[in-house]
Amino acid sequence: STALGTSKCHINIVDEMEALPTPIKGYADWRSYKAIRLENGVTVVLVHDVNSKHFACANSVSVGASCDPRELSGLAHFTEHMCFLGSEEYPRENEYKQYLSKHGGRSNASTSLSHTTYQFEILAEDEVALKALDIFVHFFVNPLFTKSGTQREVQAVDSENSKNKSTDGRRRLQILKALADQNHHYSKFTTGDRHTLPAADVEDTAYGDEIPAQSNDPQLQRIIEEINNGGEKCTKRHEADLVREAVLAFHKRHYYPERMVAVLVGPQSLEQLETWAMERFSKVVDRRVGMSEDDGDDRMRMLATRLVDRSANDAPPVSILSSDVEYVPAFRADVQGTWPVLLTTKPLSDMRKLVVYFPVPPTYSTPDNSPTSMLSHLLGHEGVGSAYAFLQDAGLITSLSAGSRINAPDQNLFQVQISLTESGERNWADVVKVVFDYADMLCKASSSDDASDLTRIWDEVSRLNRMTFNQRSPGAAYSFAPSLAQSVSKFGTYRGLTAGFHLHEGAETLPMEQLYSFCKHIVPSNCFVERCSKNAWEEIEGSDSNSSSSGYFGLQTEKWYGVEFFLTPIDEKMTALWAEPNQNASHLSLPNPNQYIPRSLELCEDLPDEAKSPRIEKAIDPPVLLENGPEGRLWWRLDDRYALPKSSLTVLIRTTKAEHKLVRLDGGAAIYDFDSKSSQLSNLLTLVFQEATAQYTYDAHLAGLGFTLSKSSSGFSLTVSGYSDRLSTYAQELLIKFCSSDFIKKNHFTSSKDRTVRSLRSFHESKRADSIAMYYRDLLLSGKNQGVENSLATVEQISLDDIISHHHDVFSDCDSKLEVLYTGNVSQDHAVTMFDAAKNIVRAKRRNVEANGSSDANRSLVPGPLERRLPPGEDIEIHFQSRNVKEENGAVIVTFQSQVDGFKGKALSTEDSLKRSAAIRLISRIVKEPFFNELRTKQQLGYIVSSFYESGYTTRQAAYFASNPAAVPHSTSIDSLSMYVLSKKVKPTDIANRIDEFLVGFRDRLVDQSEEDLDKHASALARLLTKPTRKLNSEASSHMSKIRRFSPELFSSENENNAVNSMPWDSAQILARAVRGLKKEDIISVWDSLVVNSESAKITSLVYGAKYPLEPGLQGKPLTTMEGLLKKRSTLKPYGSCETSQQ
């Protein structure tokens, strides 16, 4: 049998379904599984998750853009869009999204070359979940695909494609497709647009019937000419009808049961989930029966069916259980005529990428015993002796990764991707040479009589993969369901969870001969090289290579995005140099044994027996304050929910000097004030540290120990998480390294500064319009610096001496304190020992630097974020032109800022703040679906139409303490409601008007809402707020964010016991209760004060794209320039208790 799930296990046929092999699960996976195949052929995996508060379902159909007719590019993607717009059973276009929204749900879908996957989740109440499942399944039973929906939804696809055109990743992908064999399915344009799917702009019947067909695709033009067989002229209406018929034909041809894998996840029993699946998915029928080009008398239908049929088998089956698949690479030397060749691309952002591509044999069917995984591990290694280490030490690169860019049944494109320094850019050919030298070393090692090092490494990799598989708690059902569905469609039910985790691999299973064979493919004659940088582009433009553009070589233009690229042969001398025997052998070696692999996976002895199994349903106890002294505070929590040998440790070094400097006032007093240079120096410190420790930390990373060092307004945070066994020692090593300035080397500083400068320099030229609109809004409301241009000028002036001096200043701050949270599989004694070690490390550093505290400054200042208050009745508009020349879209973000302080916690806020915060959160959920339905589904303004709740906070700033020396730290919560649209359909000013029109009319919808519907929304939100945390790191992050914010104000104004008791650990539960208690009049009252009355505070940020540029009439107004924006900002006071304006 070639059925999904087939293995050595016996298949039992029971009534109307077959029992398939049960997926193998990890030790820490508390879920239970059952796999079946329905009588109609649908494969179903049932997952009982007792801890899930949601029911989730995914259906992955094994068809994607590889099966698109070339005459209708994007048809698979468009079919995905159309499925959401109603079925015969549920005809209303927004019924699905409206129902999900009302019951705490969400949905998504995606189309790749090989799969179209649909997913949703909803609250797990049986009645609610079952109806959502019924609506969902009918997308695959009897979707409507109406003419009006077809014409409107093409605009959504076109908007999605337009969004993609201004991002480097998408642009480079299209160039890669242009280099492929144009007869290979990989080369297809997968998104589609209004030209490849010409169904838009025919809503006016007269217009559609009179305007001639205008497709610019010659192949489609010929099809259109066939429609009337030489009769009346073909019009845009004919084009639109053809697209709709093609969608119907595609769905009929490809959406049949045997191609579907459905996954149902929920707290329901396996028996109940099985009943649901059988009752619903059994309705899906194979509609290919009797299907032919002569299906009916409609010539349009016949032509559409023919188009779909011709491309139906362009790609091989996705299941590894299918018969042998022929190796047909899309990338071959004969396509360009010769290899190696040089591809030069020009990015929008200021990047320096070097990518070397190698077609190698497919390993798709052997995910656990793949030579590609070994090759990726070794070529992408960053430890001592690696290609990365050698090139980093030479100052040529900042990052290197290796792996399959394409891993498909019929091909495998392996890539080595490198980020270059300025020196590396000049010497890129030498960098490529090192890649070949390392591959040559691997080739020799894999053919040697003594392969003990390679077998050791393979065994190590396998052990770590198995450990990862067995020691991870299950994630959320919403993301798990589609992932499992796709995996099962490829590898079957038995290996659906384990594929790629090396469960049965060890030293004796290393595919040595295949590894040797693959290494032989990593040679100059089997590659093409991409240089992606502005310097590379200028270099090739000015060379002789630009003298002609004949054939495959010279300046080329990609068909769909119009992206230019150069393709040139690589000089024979360079190729010969690359092929020479290993010139860097003395610097390159295989990895040493990994010293960070855990010695023990035992749980802490202090855990009670009942906590040695997962208890996700258990409420999370707050961390315990173990120490509160002059050097800092230690918070600790022994995990009693996840039953994993893992911990999380965060060491926050609170210091004013991360973003501030001491300023002398006229009277001689001193205060700390925000300083852009100090902030940028701190950012650079974290980058330099990460780069300087990359080789040292790589083994720990492989062994499941991760770390981050970040800077915030509070100071520097070092977070280490992973297996408990070596975590404390590793964290101490990192802290010692950070406290020492030895890591600040010239080469790391130079490359970190260079990356920062390039990122800032290309910020405006590389971002989408919506990102820029958000940037200007935030710069006005919460920015402390003077904008990207000012930051760039600041960074450009920073020297190596500056950063060494700044490091010295940070650790000479005698007022800095440690705030430490240690949680997970760690005893109290061990936590105290770690805290003592951390204090000793920082204390020793301070003794080595000159004391430079703030003895003459106000010590009450504890830095934190800033947000300014919009005055009541304020209606600010910001207008700016996008500087991204490829951005067609404009963007509008409208934000309403609440005028009442938001909820902080039971002991810290009033009942009015609690009720208002609860109401704004609920309003944001209620408005989301109608806003999307009106502006996206009906008006088709753009692909991105969204609304969301925002919760921020602000703290007392330096200027406040200058005026109030006796003040203590204090923070204020801020609630906001935001709506935003990305669109090229109309001008940004028109978008803003349409948002306003919607908001004005929405009040009537609120008034008309039944109490029952409001209760459903409230219940859904309350459950989301109290949804159990499923990951230790998420729990630790939530606790640390509260500690970071509330500790200073509580411990400054309360005694220790009161401070601990006032910590708002339970704020989510309190908000949930408040949400459930809201009445309609509460919601309408808050809506009026927030959005529609004269006291509402509103800011609208508009960014203009290429299609509708900033209008001359708006230019010159105050908030169309940075000068005007910053001037306006100077008039706004910080939100909360501070009455002093903040520049």
Image: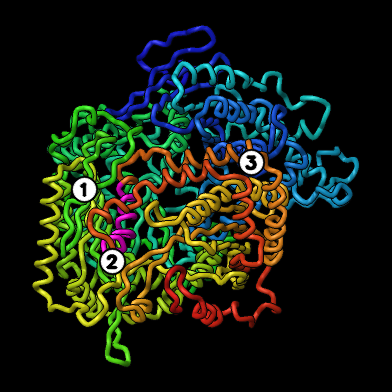
Q: Amino acid at mark 2?
A: Gly
- Label 3: few (<14), some or many (≥20) within 10 Å? many
Residue 74: say if magenta. no
Task: Confirm whether residue 785 shows in the render.
Answer: yes
Task: Confirm whether residue 536 shows in the render.
Answer: no
Quarter of the figure with the N terminus: top left
In the rendered structure, find residue 636 and report the number of the disc placed on it.
1
Which mark is in front, 1 or 2?
1
- The relative height of residue 768 versus residue 1117 in the rendered view (above or below) is above
Left or right of residue 273, residue 436 in this image? left
**Disc 2 marks which residue?**
715
**Disc 3 marks which residue?**
81
Residue 1049: say if magenta. yes
Element carrying mark 2: strand
Q: Amino acid at mark 1?
A: Trp
User: Quick one: label 1 or label 3, which is nearer the N terminus?
Assistant: 3
Residue 374: horizontal and vertical position, in percent? 27, 41
Magenta segment range? 1036-1052
Quarter of the figure with the C terminus: bottom left
Q: How is the image coloured?
A: rainbow
